[in-house]
Amino acid sequence: MDKIYNGIVIFGEMGAGKDALAELICKLREKAKIYKISVLCREMMKVSKVNPMWRGKERYIGQTLADRIRDLDIDIMCDYILTLIYEKGQRKYGWDNSHLKVEDFNNALLEQLSVIRNDELSIVVGGRTITDLNYWRNKNYLIVGIKVSEEVRKDRLISRDGQEMVKNSSSQHNTEIDVPYIISNLCHEVILNDGTLEDLKDSAEKVLLKYNF
């Protein structure tokens, strides 16, 4: 592929293997760094360690917080992640976009992200919604979906989170409901993750080579 993307954003349902895919990419490419869209929500999920009323409801906390944060600004969670990526380049290159109007600002940002791409391959994990997809596509990120059969997905979720948390999680929540459609119709690449970690690693390498990462 001739097109150079600024990074990769991974979409997938709960338990599909988004984190595993991101970690394998980091092993395959030394400049890769992971950024999780859910980082703010996951920090709050930790309250179950000191308050038993939230035990088993951690994912409910995360999903509810995502709703509240997006009520403030639909893009704010993605903006936060992009800020973490951007600030590294800003510190290194001394960029200042504060005087630019919207169109010039957006053009400058895209150019700056392409410069950051030379220093770091950013892997954004946890795209959920059509809005998230449009956000990262407009930032020239490769959209990668990861899918898994329902039986395998459920087994992995129970193994990772426990039966109670899985029972209290909703695959029909608005942070989850867009994902199957996105995986089936809107990704640049889709990886099937029903096999072993070695299978997933092989699939990741093929995508990285295809898109010049």
Image (spheres, grey):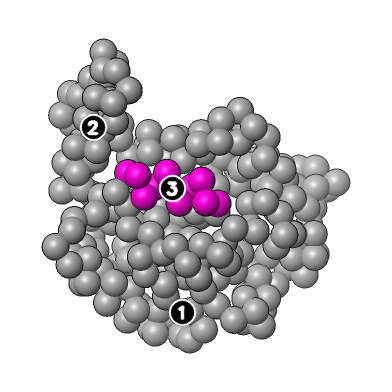
Picture coordinates of residue 201, whole percent (x, y): 35, 77
- Between residue 109 and residue 194, name the one nearer to us: 109
**Residue found 55% across the figure and 70% down from its top:** 16
**Residue found 63% across the figure and 42% down from its top:** 66
The C terminus - image quarter: bottom left
- Between residue 167 and residue 9, name the one nearer to us: 9
Q: Nearer the viewer, mark 1 or mark 2?
A: 2
Q: Amino acid at mark 1?
A: Leu
Q: Is 97 rendered above or below residue 181?
A: above
Q: Amino acid at mark 2?
A: Asn
**Residue found 62% across the figure and 76% down from its top:** 153
Q: Is 71 rendered above or below residue 177?
A: above
Work out how far the residue at label 3 is from the one at label 2, CA to CA, in angstroms. Answer: 16 Å
Residue under numbered circle 1: 192
Q: Earlier in the sequence, mark 1 or mark 3?
A: 3
Q: Are marks 1 and 2 in contact (CB under 8 Å)?
A: no
Specify whether residue 35 is in view. no
**Residue found 22% across the figure and 72% down from its top:** 210
Picture coordinates of residue 45, whole percent (x, y): 67, 46
Residue under numbered circle 2: 107
